[in-house]
Image: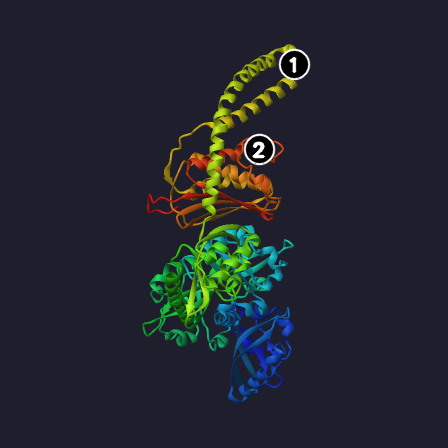
């Protein structure tokens, strides 16, 4: 008898509602009716819930609370509360419930309960409270997938433990592109959404993801740009079951007006012509308009002017694709001000899959938006204060640090942090000798001790070890810090003179190369002439029918002569004192133009190329020579990198120069080989001539640039440093 309350003109609203709308027996509190939304939100079909106790899904920790809530509701005639409910997979979500005691003449009383998923809101509140801990607690306990993605390369920099849902662990995904986990059909949309984050603070989108085993899973993701603008924070939820439920709900054409009349969220039904057929009474509570006061047709004037274009585009796309849509927009209240609404629209189709209308459910998210704005404003103010203080103490170009009487660091400036490669937290409190080269520690300790004994030791040099193992040569000047006549510490200023020493060595090598080139040029020309003659006679013999049986040998000889001629050509190019055509040009543009060629080489060899191009100014370059330089260095890096590995091309501006870095994942270059790199005819390859790198060295020299080579067991990085000369205010795209 109670189920008759569900019949009539209102079934469609219940079937399409975002909330679970259920009926319970007043005495036993067992399910009398369960809406299809239970399957979408909890994973239970209505048939699985029928006859079950209404509190059977409550979290054990919330059971006492829910029992008291029910008892109080039976007395008052209504129930309002928030607690956790168990999903079919064993996980729990936060829900908000609104219950009403329904009394009907000559029928048993029953309780109508409207339940909506507030898990995302709860998680957002927790995330906001724990933002300084990078969502640590929520990441460890939430079923949602939480990740942080680099805004330039779209690679993972952090993933939550919940990524085990996909079969991956943190170590497998860090540094990988997030697009690798998205179905091919949805990659363009995902890439568009990620780029949209650079313009809009928040994005929301749905897509098919890929598990480690190759199977597919549906996700709904919400993204936010970090305050620094360098990272995306993405929260993803498994909506596979929800997608299945949505497909099942499409067949229903009935509405449940009595239930929707008591919903807190607003519901609007529009036919295929855009005419409003139904407005829930809750719209008056949300927007101040009574159902009678809203015009028969959709009134775009109620939508904020800045949101109308996106609103229309999103709705039209949903209609065209016959898919659901989620959007946020500002709507004008009856009193004249605007409030933020979150809306979900579901397209109605007939049996012939033709569009017949739209069901829109919306809720007030103004409080959430205001909270987000306050947080952003607080972050902005804190950042301004930090930047002001940080600029004051980090204007020096020298390493600057302070250590106490125990030789432990108590202060480090920005240059010290950048130079050593450690974070501030990793440096403070550590002994200065932890960063001194082992062979130099005793002399540094003796000099430091002399300062505490009021002895002026002047300037001296020693080596320091960076976090990545790189050695730097620094020139030191220290001054004691005196408090009340007692030396309590030492202030140290030091200059990095590593590049200066390398430049001295490079000048000596270049002088040797010029001498070798001049000698080689003469010899190469003398060799080429007889080779040309021999090649000509071989070509004539090749055409002679009497030598058809020797044709294979003749072709081999011609091929080897051509190969030798090519080597001589490269050597002549190396020896030739070329004049470069230097013009202002963006180096990033050159790299992007070469990217398809380089990516093809990488793909054929089962390797990957990643571009990390920073904002760098235009440089005075010879475009042809720089293209040759990049191609030679990248192909060498690909050959050094094992299959499945990655080669990175990086550009950035540091102080007064722009750097181009080619980083491989090879085994590294031994020290004895490093000393000989760039020497013609020296190569570690079986068929190499060594001329490729020698030509690269010549190009670098002609551009008055510098080359740094950092090599260890994890790989090798070739870094070309171009002196920056301001020629234009434009920045490379």
Residue 300, quarter of picture: bottom left
Give yes or no for contact between labels 2 and 1 (Cβ–Cβ under 8 Å): no
Residue furthest to the left in view is 336
Classify 352 as above or below 12.
above
Residue 393, quarter of picture: bottom left
Classify 262 as above or below 728.
below
The image position of residue 509, as x and y in percent, is 49, 36
Q: Between residues 128 and 730, which one lies in front from this camera angle?
A: 730
Would you name the residue on which mark 2 appears? 682
In this picture, residue 591 sits left or right of residue 31: left
Mark number, residue 548 = 1
Residue 573: in sight, yes or no?
no
Residue 490: in sight, yes or no?
yes
The image position of residue 511, as x and y in percent, is 47, 33
User: How many C-alpha atoms fall within 10 Å of the one at disc 2: few (<14), some, or many (≥20)?
Assistant: some
The image position of residue 454, as x and y in percent, is 45, 63
């Amino acid at each position: 008898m109670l189920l008759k309350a569900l019949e009539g003109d209102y079934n469609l609203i219940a079937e399409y509602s975002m909330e679970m709308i259920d009926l319970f027996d007043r005495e036993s509190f067992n399910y009398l009716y369960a809406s299809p939304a239970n399957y979408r939100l909890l994973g239970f079909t209505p048939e699985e819930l029928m006859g079950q106790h209404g509190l059977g899904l409550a979290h054990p920790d919330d059971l006492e609370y829910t029992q008291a809530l029910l008892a109080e509701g039976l007395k008052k005639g209504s129930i309002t509360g928030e607690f956790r409910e168990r999903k079919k997979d064993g996980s729990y979500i936060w829900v908000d419930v609104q219950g009403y005691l329904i009394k009907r003449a000559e029928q048993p009383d029953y309780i109508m309960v409207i339940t909506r998923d507030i898990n995302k809101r709860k998680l957002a509140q927790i995330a906001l409270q724990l933002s300084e801990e990078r969502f640590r607690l929520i990441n460890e306990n939430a079923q949602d997938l939480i990740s942080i993605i680099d805004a330039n390369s779209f690679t993972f920099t952090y993933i939550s433990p919940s990524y085990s849902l996909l079969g991956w662990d943190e170590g497998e995904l860090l540094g990988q592109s997030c697009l690798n986990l998205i179905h091919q059909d949805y990659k363009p949309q995902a890439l568009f959404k990620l780029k949209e984050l650079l313009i809009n603070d928040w994005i929301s989108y749905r897509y098919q993801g890929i598990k480690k085993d190759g199977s597919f899973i549906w996700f709904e993701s919400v993204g936010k740009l970090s305050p620094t603008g360098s990272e995306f924070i993405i929260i993803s939820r498994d909506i596979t079951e929800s997608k299945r439920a949505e497909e099942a709900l499409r067949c229903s054409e009935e509405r449940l007006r009595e239930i929707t009349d008591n919903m807190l969220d607003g519901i609007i039904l529009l036919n295929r012509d855009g005419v409003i057929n139904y407005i829930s009474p809750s719209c008056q509570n949300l927007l101040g308009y009574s159902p009678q006061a809203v015009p028969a047709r959709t009134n775009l004037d109620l939508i904020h002017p800045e949101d109308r274009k996106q609103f229309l585009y999103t709705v039209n796309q949903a209609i065209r694709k016959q898919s659901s849509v989620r959007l946020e927009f500002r709507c004008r209240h009856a009193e004249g001000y605007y409030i933020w609404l979150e809306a979900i629209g579901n397209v109605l189709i007939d049996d012939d899959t033709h569009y017949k209308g739209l069901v829109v459910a919306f809720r007030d998210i103004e409080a959430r938006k205001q909270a987000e704005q306050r947080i952003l404003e607080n972050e902005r103010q804190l950042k301004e204060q930090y930047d002001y203080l940080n600029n004051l103490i980090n204007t020096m170009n020298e390493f600057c640090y302070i250590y106490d009487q125990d030789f432990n660091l108590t202060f480090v400036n920005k240059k010290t942090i950048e130079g050593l490669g450690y974070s501030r937290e990793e440096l403070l409190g550590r002994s200065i000798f932890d960063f001194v080269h082992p062979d130099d520690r005793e002399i540094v300790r003796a000099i430091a001790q002399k300062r505490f004994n009021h002895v002026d030791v002047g300037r001296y040099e020693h080596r320091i070890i960076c976090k990545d193992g790189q050695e730097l040569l620094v020139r030191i000047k220290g001054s004691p810090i005196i408090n009340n006549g007692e030396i309590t510490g030492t202030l140290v200023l030091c200059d990095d003179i590593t590049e200066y020493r390398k430049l001295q060595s490079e000048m000596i090598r270049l002088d040797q190369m010029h001498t070798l080139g001049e000698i080689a040029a003469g010899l190469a020309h003398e060799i080429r002439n007889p080779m040309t003659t021999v090649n000509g006679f071989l070509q004539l013999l090749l055409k002679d029918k009497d030598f058809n049986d020797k044709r294979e040998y003749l072709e081999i000889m011609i091929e080897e002569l051509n190969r030798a001629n090519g080597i001589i050509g490269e050597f002549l190019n190396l020896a030739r004192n070329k004049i470069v055509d230097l013009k202002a040009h963006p180096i990033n543009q050159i790299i992007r133009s070469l990217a398809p060629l380089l990516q093809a080489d990488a793909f054929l060899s089962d390797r990957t190329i990643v571009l990390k191009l920073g904002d760098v100014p235009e440089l005075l370059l010879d475009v042809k020579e720089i293209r040759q330089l990049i191609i030679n260095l990248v192909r060498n890096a690909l050959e050094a990198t094992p299959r499945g590995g990655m080669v990175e091309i990086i550009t950035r501006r540091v102080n007064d120069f722009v750097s181009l870095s080619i980083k491989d994942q090879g085994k590294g270059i031994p020290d004895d080989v490093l000393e000989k790199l760039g020497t013609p005819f020296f190569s570690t390859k079986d068929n190499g001539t060594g001329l490729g790198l020698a030509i690269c060295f010549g190009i670098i020299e002609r551009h008055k640039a510098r080359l740094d080579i950092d090599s260890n067991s994890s790989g090798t990085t070739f870094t070309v440093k171009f002196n920056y000369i301001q020629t234009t205010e434009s920045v490379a795209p």
